[in-house]
Image: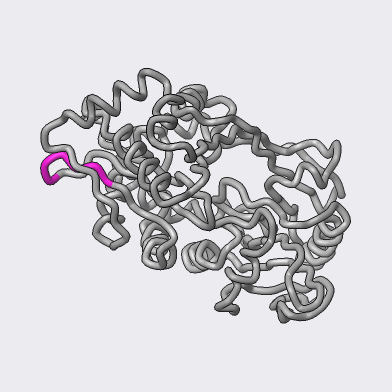
Amino acid sequence: MPSDQPHSAPGASGIGIVNPLEYPDWDQSVGSLPGAGFFHGRAWARVLHETYGYRPVYFVRNEAGRPQALLPLMEVRSWLTGRRGVALPFTDACEPLAADADAARQLREAAYQYGTGQGWKYLETCGGRHFLGETPASTVFYGHQLDLRGGEAALQGRFDGAVRRAIKKAGQQDGLKIDFSRDAAGMDSFYRLLCLTRKRHGLPPQPARFFDNIQRHVLAGGHGWTVLATHGDRPVAGAVYFHAGKKALYKYGASDDDFQHLRANQLVMWQAIRRYAAEGYDLLDFGRTSLTNEGLRRYKLNWGTTEQTVEYFRYDLRQRAYLPAKDGASGWHSQVFRRLPIPVLRAAGALLYPHMG
């Protein structure tokens, strides 16, 4: 295989390495594979590449000129954290797509061979437990999904009573309005809320250019929404959603804690659920949740979701073994970040995130 610039025409037979950004019809080709979702598509690859400089290294198995299996990877090159392959950075779930265990094994072995030649420390994938047998997971999270079918009454019937009361209270607030947007102004308002929320959680925000690229490549392309709650003229809560096929994804949420009493977060979620259900989507994925974050887990369960586990597998290419990895969502650093002003947190995020993929 080529040592630095992987490239293989997606119509070729056998296993090749492709960059989806070079193929305008990538989404149509890959979208036909069972299990394909938003994160397998071209828009998300462009966001990661343009924001952080990660290089797409997508392993594809073709038969009769059509893709039959896919292992999407980004090569992360960092002087701080090393070189590695990740499927995919900052992504809740992006399972390998394969019809059987043999196809999945061939893709993994090709990736191991390539990564070894590139000096990767490890290869990290998400999902694919049915291909890996008793292989131990490196990290485990909760996942939650809401069935959007059956109408509004059935949906609300599955909500916890506290959720229904919060939605009702928010709907009675004078001056509280919900807007769906795909423009840069809506994303800028959301990002300001996100900075407040990340500080509250003791984490630096992602770089502003990350959300700029989401707006340009995902939302403007019709693959998602920014949903904002405003009180008067002031944004008080918001969320970013992606969608592909029949599945929507709740990716980011944020709020101004000074307006928590309005229950605007619940109204944002409810209006997004209503819209996606009305437009014929089957599922809303609530994203991953750390096993230690019982509050967030309970919040998602209260919406009537079903709970699964989301498993990550990290294969150390030097030790030739699957090794455990730490969920770094919390720790001593959270106390430090909570004390820093937002401009300093933004600078820290811009510096650190490229190394964290």
User: Looking at the image, is 113 positioned above or below residue 6?
Assistant: above
Looking at the image, which is closer to me, 250 or 64? 64
Looking at the image, which is closer to me, 59 or 357? 59
Residue 92 is situated, as x and y percent measured from the top left of the image, at: 57, 46
User: Looking at the image, is 206 positioned above or below residue 267?
Assistant: below
User: Looking at the image, is 245 positioned above or below residue 256?
Assistant: below
Predominant SS of the magenta segment: strand
Residue 156 is situated, as x and y percent measured from the top left of the image, at: 39, 28
Residue 85 is situated, as x and y percent measured from the top left of the image, at: 69, 58
Evaluate whether residue 343 shows in this view.
Answer: no
Quarter of the figure with the N terminus: bottom right
Give the residue drawn at x 39%, y 57%.
Answer: 211
Residue 301 part of the magenta-drawn span: no
Residue 231 part of the magenta-drawn span: yes
The magenta stretch is: 228-233
Where residue 17 sits, quadrant-wise, is bottom right
User: What is the tally of numbered marks visible in this picture?
Assistant: 0
Looking at the image, which is closer to me, 67 or 237? 67
Give the residue drawn at x 62%, y 60%.
Answer: 76
Coloring applied to the structure = one colour
Residue 210 is situated, as x and y percent measured from the top left of the image, at: 42, 59
* Residue sticking out furthest to the top: 161
Evaluate whether residue 174 shows in this view.
Answer: yes
Seen in the image, is 173 located left or right of residue 136? left
Where residue 169 sits, quadrant-wise, is top left
Give the residue drawn at x 29%, y 28%.
Answer: 167
Give the residue drawn at x 42%, y 21%.
Answer: 160
